[in-house]
Image (cartoon, helix red, strand yellow):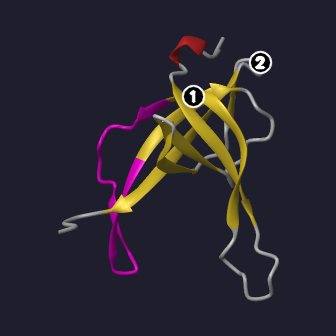
Amino acid sequence: MLGLDTGSLDRRVRIEQPVADAAFDGAGSGEWESIATVWASIVDALPSRGERLAEGINVSTRPARVRMRYRADVTAAMRLVEILGGADGRVMQIVTVPAELGRRDGLEMMVETYEPGGNTA
């Protein structure tokens, strides 16, 4: 049985969903709305060739696996914000459909943090 080890939920994350801008000229300028703040486990993936060129800009991705208690309202259109010492830490876009662990014990999903790649000096 694949369950969730609740003792490993050692990070606070805020689940956010996009809110579209209703203005006629507001395409792409929506906001993010907080859904909940939960305990989660974040395990970074091993380093690999995570750098790519996107429209001439070198972009580095930082993939990770996130586990949390089961929630029926989490989708791949959402993002997670890690909370570090009361302040916002890295912003992680959910890149896979969340998978159910056990019988609604938990959720597991892959996320990516996007950062400038290469020499930033």
Looking at the rendering, in which quadrant would you find the N terminus? Answer: top right
Segment tinted magenta in the rendering: 42-62
Residue 103 is tagged as: 2
Query: Around disc 1, counting alpha carbons within 10 Å, would you say few (fewer than 14), some (14 to 19), or many (20 or more)?
Result: many
Residue sitting at x 34%, y 75%:
57
Is residue 48 depicted above or below 58 in this figure?
above
In the figure, is residue 13 to the left or right of 21? left
Of the image marks 1 and 2, the number of the one nearer the N terminus: 1
The residue that mark 1 highlights is 40
**Looking at the image, which residue sits at the far front?**
86
Nearest the viewer among 68 and 31 is 31
Percent from the top left, x then y, of residue 88? 50, 46
- Residue type pointed to by label 2: Arg
Residue 85 % position (x, y): 46, 34
What kind of secondary structure does the magenta stretch mostly adopt? Answer: strand
Residue type (three-letter) at the residue carrying disc 1: Ala
Check residue 51 for magenta coloring. yes
Q: Does the rendering let one see residue 56?
A: yes
Question: Mark 1, mark 2: which one is toward the viewer?
Answer: 1
